[in-house]
């Protein structure tokens, strides 16, 4: 059974940086996309970034482009999200997810498995 476990969340000041990690276990098939989503209080979950199985393609939401970087180590089954220049009030739960396909997906219902999320709390 596949399991995704996020880590790295915490309290961060506006303008600061944070690095999230996600470890995938129980999966041997590696030709799939990995993505990060976030859900702020009172809002719907939204797409943040995605990366192809060989790291050859990355995609970002316009709101995080040029500030966030997604990366993966397929040999270690890990995916990371480096977040820089975090905005004030940027509190959300960040989730990693896997999309069992070699095509990009930016909608959450296209993803097959999810982690439990890691809390990022922004302070101004």
Image (cartoon, rainbow, N blue to C red):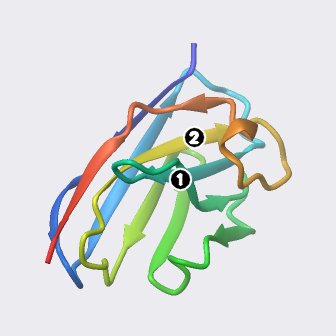
Answer with left or right where residue 63 lies relative to residue 122: right
In this orientation, which residue lies closer to the viewer: 20 or 73? 20
Would you say the residues marked 2 and 1 are in contact, meaning their CB atoms lie under 8 Å apart?
yes
Asked if residue 76 shows in the view, the reply is no
Number of other residues with Cα within 10 Å of mark 1, as a class: few under 14, some 14 to 19, many 20 or more: many
Question: Which residue: 52% across, 48% down?
Answer: 45
Residue 10 location, x and y as percent?
18, 55
Residue 52 location, x and y as percent?
73, 57
**Which of the labelled discs sits on residue 2, or is there none?**
none
Question: Which residue: 61% across, 79% down?
Answer: 62
Instruction: Count every numbered label the image shows and give the total.
Output: 2
Question: Which residue: 74% across, 68% down?
Answer: 56
Answer with left or right where residue 78 lies relative to residue 20: right
Q: Which residue is mark 1?
A: 36
Residue 54 location, x and y as percent?
72, 58
The first of marks 2 and 1 along the sequence is 1
Number of other residues with Cα within 10 Å of mark 2, as a class: few under 14, some 14 to 19, many 20 or more: many
Against 90, residue 5 (above or below) is: above
In this orientation, which residue lies closer to the viewer: 87 or 32? 87
Q: Which residue is mark 2?
A: 97
Question: Which residue: 25% across, 70% down?
Answer: 89
SS for tag 1?
strand
Against 75, residue 10 (above or below) is: below
């Amino acid at each position: 059974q596949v399991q995704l476990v996020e880590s790295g969340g915490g309290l961060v000041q506006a303008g600061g940086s944070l690095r999230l990690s996600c470890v995938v276990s129980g999966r041997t098939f590696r030709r799939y996309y990995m993505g990060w989503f976030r859900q702020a209080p009172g809002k719907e979950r939204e797409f943040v970034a995605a990366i192809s199985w060989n790291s050859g393609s990355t995609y970002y939401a316009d709101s995080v482009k040029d500030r966030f970087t997604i990366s993966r180590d397929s040999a270690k089954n890990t995916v990371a999200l480096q977040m820089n220049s975090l905005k004030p009030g940027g509190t959300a739960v960040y989730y990693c997810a896997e999309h069992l396909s070699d095509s990009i997906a930016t909608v959450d219902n296209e993803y097959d498995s999810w982690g439990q999320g890691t809390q990022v709390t922004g302070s101004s």
